Image (cartoon, rainbow, N blue to C red):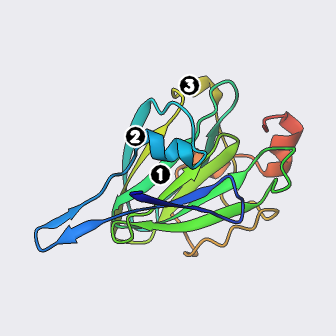
Amino acid sequence: MPFEFKKLEIPDVVLIKPKIFEDERGFFMETYKKEDFEKAGITGNFIQDNHSKSKYGVLRGLHFQRKPYAQAKIVRCIKGIIYDVAVDLRKKSSYFGKYIGAILSEFNKHLLYIPRGFAHGFVVLSNEAEVVYKVDNIYAPDYESGLIWNDMDINIQWPIDEPVISEKDGKWPTLKELKEREELF
């Protein structure tokens, strides 16, 4: 199989290690094969690919879309290095409010599968980074939401002290506020 699927501390989040065929000319790898992903329990109809570029220290997130436009994602970093984070927002999950963090880079070529019901974000650790990700639902601006990146109840251990964040990302609510608004899964 061209992939190794590793369930993480929150088992629904999966680190995917593709098999790399490398020689003096360069490398080749498969980044997605529906049949293999489905055998590993990663189902869904991925309908859109997104691509972002950011500079060192930029933190994007923590983003999610509310039902019925929630999105599962398969994330990878094709240039540079990022610390990628998924926070479980599923009220009935035993991992509710917990997070997973993983280094994704052009060097390790790992992917991270994040199911629906999670907030997602990343911070750039290299001079710049390019991130591509597949989603299984359309972007619906009226259903866009987020979780503040530095929520003390979640206590994400970001690997940089002073990230660069957008005005919008600096105003997302805390997990407690999301609970009160009933914006969870």
- Mark 2 touching mark 3, by CB under 8 A? no
Q: Residue under circle 1?
A: 75
Picture coordinates of residue 122, whole percent (x, y): 53, 59
Q: CA distance from mark 1 to mark 2?
A: 9 Å
Q: Nearer the viewer, residue 149 or 184?
A: 184
Q: Is residue 164 above or below residue 32?
A: below
- Contact? badges 3 and 1 (CB < 8 Å): no
Circle number at residue 140: 3
Q: Is residue 169 above or below residue 56?
A: above
Which amino acid type is shown beneath numbered disc 3?
Ala
Judge whether residue 151 can be spotted in this image. yes
Observer-side mark, 2 or 3, equals 2
Secondary-structure class at tag 3: loop
In what element is the residue under mark 2?
strand
**Which percent across, then down, holds residue 106?**
33, 66
**Residue at the spot x=69%, y=49% of the render?**
147
Q: Quadrant of residue 39?
A: top right
- The amino acid type of the residue labelled 1 equals Val
Q: Residue at x 39, y 59 (%)?
A: 77
